[in-house]
Image: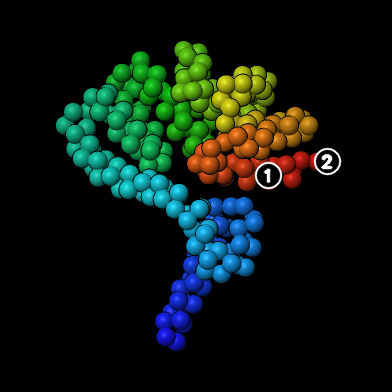
Amino acid sequence: MDVLRHLFSSWGFVLQILAIVHLVRRRGAFFWFFIILMGGYIGAIAYILIEVVPDVYLLQEAFARFERKKYIQKLKFTVAENPSAGNLEELAELYFDQKEFLKARETFDRAISTRNDSIHALYHRGLCAFELHDFPAAIADLEPVVRSDADFDHYRASFFLARAYAQCGNDQQADALFAEVVQHATIPETWYHYASFLKSQNRFDEAREWAQKIFEKRRTMPRFVERRERPWFAKARTLLKELPS
């Protein structure tokens, strides 16, 4: 019995450590820290059931990455035999999903040179350029996309174009486009980047207002959405601390 009690106590301690590590990495609510410490293994189990188990869906992305890698290898052989625009775009999108932005950009280049009327390919090549910090190239690709369809990909094209304008110092264009985007794309990511842009323009009151909107929206979010958007709450909290009183 003493051995079983010792093992159970050890496992309870391990559960507490795992729960605290998850809490810190996910930037969860601070009250859980006290529940885990004061509640022992029961508090740790409560945290795992309420906060960790719902995050199991994140494992799906890990499996998806593995499957994409296998399909990429298969598609590369297909492209070697038939380098059509469609095959090249599909391969480029897989690279993009894997966050291999340089390979994705080079492959989109080949697809666009084969068929230059694909707004979809132009948009994704612009995103690749943005992620590679080549902001002038991102602007060159995203401008025709936005001219063609301002709400392309639920205003994501306009959103990244506004950010690219800001990075290049085109503040008036960035401001006008941001102001349009945040009226339609009402998610924490867009509001956070708009607030960050306003901060860079020394428009601190407006920046604070948009950062606070993120927390107001949080109150009405379903739990699974709140969990997904959690990093933006942490960034908004940091931004608010950086703003002068």
Q: Which of 77 and 158 is in front in this view?
A: 158
Dot 2: what SS?
A: loop
Q: Are marks 1 and 2 in contact (CB under 8 Å)?
A: no
Residue at 74% across, 35% down: 208
Q: In this view, does 140 lie above or below 209?
A: above
Pointer 2: what residue?
Answer: 245
Residue 52 visible in the snapshot: yes
- Identify the amino acid type marked 2: Ser
- What x and y, as percent, mark residue 45? 49, 62
Q: Distance between the residues labelled 1 and 2?
A: 14 Å
- What x and y, as percent, mark residue 229? 55, 40
- What x and y, as percent, mark residue 137? 49, 27
Pointer 1: what residue?
Answer: 237
Residue at 52% across, 68% down: 41
**Rendered-image quadrant of the N terminus:** bottom left
- Identify the amino acid type marked 1: Arg
Q: In this view, does 150 lie above or below 220?
A: above
Residue at 61% across, 37% down: 218
